[in-house]
Image (spheres, rainbow, N blue to C red):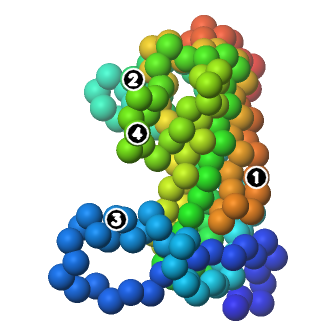
Amino acid sequence: MDKEFTGTYVPVMHNKFIAGTAQLSAIIMFCLTVTTHAVAQQNVGVTGKPDFYFSIRSQDGNLREYRSKIVPNIPLHVCYGWRLKLVNVTNIVQFTEKFSLPSEPAFWSSEDNSYATSAISKDRKTSVTKKYVVPEEGWIGNSWCVVEGDPLGVYKMRIFVSDVPIGEISFEIVSLADYRKRSAKD
């Protein structure tokens, strides 16, 4: 354990199995039901709060990333998300993201998909995403893109690792004109 680590430790399921000739569907089913099997636990460190970002893809395909919590509503050109650095992780990590919008959107990508990793609330303003992931160099995260019909206003994401609350992110999606005005002041 790193002596300088000052973050939070949370228990994370650690699955040990021998990869063999099992079919991909069997592996997927195993990952989805891992909580019903005897699993080893390890203490995974979280090195601070989730890092929020958004990116804009220009007409020529170039991508530029920003750290502001004011996000322009430019459908199909703007995506946003969070990243979280973990330490002491060697295998599968489960995270949950509770994502609330200021009002219901015109469209949720996973709304009518019973196999999706996200469930949509009855009022259509909240998505709960639960994923099992293998961190890349200790990083986990999730992202969304602005689409036509997304509401303007304050959005909130609550992030949990192994059902332990890690942080909350609030950001605002504004019209392009409002974004330009606010950006000119900075």
Image quarter in which the N terminus is found: bottom right
Do the residues under discs 4 and 1 have CB atoms within 8 angstroms? no
Q: Which mark is residue 73?
A: none
| Rendering quarter of residue 72 | top right
State the residue position of label 2.
76
Q: Tell me the kind of residue under disc 2.
A: Leu
Q: Earlier in the sequence, mark 4 or mark 3?
A: 3
Q: Earlier in the sequence, mark 3 or mark 2?
A: 3
The residue at the point 55 percent across, 52 percent down is 130
State the residue position of label 1.
167
Count of number-bearing discs: 4
State the residue position of label 3.
28
Distance in Å between CA atoms under marks 1 and 3:
28 Å
The residue at the point 76 percent across, 46 percent down is 168
Residue 165 vs 127, above or below: the answer is below
| Disc 1 crowd, CA 10 A, few/some/many (<14, 14-19, 20+) | some
Image quarter in which the C terminus is found: top right
Do the residues under discs 4 and 3 have CB atoms within 8 angstroms? no
Q: Position of residue 141 (x, y in %)?
A: 54, 54
Q: Earlier in the sequence, mark 4 or mark 2?
A: 2
* Closer to us: 36 or 139: 36
Q: Which mark is residue 114?
A: 4
Q: Nearer the viewer, mark 1 or mark 2?
A: 1
Q: Tell me the kind of residue under disc 4.
A: Ser
| Disc 3 crowd, CA 10 A, few/some/many (<14, 14-19, 20+) | few
The residue at the point 54 percent across, 38 percent down is 119
Q: Tell me the kind of residue under disc 3.
A: Ile
| Extreme-front residue of the structure | 36
